[in-house]
Image: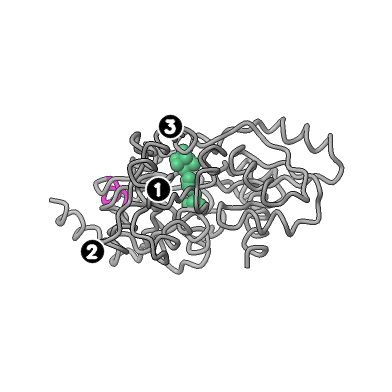
Amino acid sequence: MEDQIKQQIRKLKDEKNAVILAHYYVPDEVQDIADYVGDSFYLAKIAKQSAADIIIFCGVSFMGESAKILNPEKKVLMPDRTADCPMAHMVAPGKIEEMRKAYDDLAVVCYINSTAELKSMSDVCVTSSNAIRIVRSLPNKNIFFIPDRHLGHYIAEQVPEKHIILNDGCCPVHASIRVDELKDEKRRHPKALVLSHPECDSDILLLSDYIGSTAEIIAYAKGSAAEEFIICTEDGVAFRLKADDPNKRFYFPRTRPCCPDMKRNTLEKLLHVLQTEENEIEVSEELRTRALAPLDRMLELAR
Ligand code: 13P
Ligand code: SF4
């Protein structure tokens, strides 16, 4: 059955000149059939460059929206329009205006995991793989980092010369990774290296050997001579980790971190949108141009 669906997807994809982009957190079989699989930064770059007529984005709303903002000529479809990142909404626009009034030289730095409206109110976007470099390169001393307080806190530690104002948002999946469960895994596997995403709480990061975006965690594990790893990020990365190194062992905290929104991207829904071209992402031209500026600035500064 799965093979049949995959065959249909491949055929329709070619007929319609469509390209499938998938984040590392979507189900294994969707990663398996995608043309490009990556972290948020890689996928944003691919979306901007794509020459396909249709981009099918297997991820969450802010990713599909960013693809449309960066490549407005393309039809951008998502297998499930309800797949949304709760953190993308975790700052009130009024709060941004309040901060701008409080600091003359404020830069609003917006984690890409945000709605188009929040991006449009920001000076620059970042992802977890380029945030430190971009924040360091800004001329502003005062930075309002939205929406993720954990990533913001991690950047503040790495870039102490900046005054980083944190916002009270977080990723419910990464923030729920428990220190006691990580300590249990460390006891069980004393030789394992701990690789964590910066969306985790600082208590988790303090116990980590390496901190990076999903793609950076995967690259680190691949390049490392170690044979065992405890992974503190969403469990979808296991598919690539195991494919890259079948002999290495990867452990997750007992309550396996799983993003229900990412997992809404099933093969069946992917086939359905390819057939029907439903679930198109629409962004008004006025909002698109305002949200494009901080995304373009990110791509420029991260170069
Ligand atoms: P990255 O893919 O940039 O590591 O982001 C993780 C994430 O939570 C995406 O929703
Ligand atoms: Fe949002 Fe967290 Fe899910 Fe990523 S893992 S989409 S940040 S809820």
Quadrant of residue 235 within the rendered picture? top left
Do we see residue 64 in this rendering? Answer: no
| Alpha carbon distance from label 1 to label 3 | 14 Å
Q: Secondary structure at mark 2?
A: helix
Q: Secondary structure at mark 3?
A: helix
Q: Amino acid at mark 2?
A: Lys
Q: Secondary structure at mark 1?
A: strand
Where does residue 69 sit, x and y in percent of width and height? 56, 54
Q: Is residue 173 left or right of residue 146?
A: left
Q: How is the image coloured?
A: one colour
User: Which numbered disc covers residue 46?
Assistant: none
| Alpha carbon distance from label 2 to label 1 | 36 Å
Where does residue 129 sit, x and y in percent of width and height? 56, 56
Q: Which residue is mark 1?
A: 231
Question: Which stretch did the figure color magenta?
Answer: 269-273
As rendered, which of 150 and 298 lies closer to the eye?
150
Q: Residue furthest left?
A: 1
Q: Which residue is mark 2?
A: 11
Neighbourhood count class around disc 2 (C-alpha, 10 Å): few under 14, some 14–19, many 20 upward: few
Tell me which label, 3 or 2, sits earlier in the chain. 2
User: Which numbered disc covers residue 180?
Assistant: 3
| Alpha carbon distance from label 3 to label 2 | 48 Å
Neighbourhood count class around disc 3 (C-alpha, 10 Å): few under 14, some 14–19, many 20 upward: few
Where does residue 132 sit, x and y in percent of width and height? 65, 55
Do we see residue 241 in this rendering? Answer: yes
Q: Amino acid at mark 1?
A: Ile
Neighbourhood count class around disc 1 (C-alpha, 10 Å): few under 14, some 14–19, many 20 upward: many
Residue positioned 67% across, 53% down in the render: 294
The answer to whether the residues at label 1 and label 3 have Cβ atoms under 8 Å apart is no
Q: Eyeballing the image, is 35 above or below 26?
A: below
The kind of secondary structure the magenta stretch mainly shows is: helix
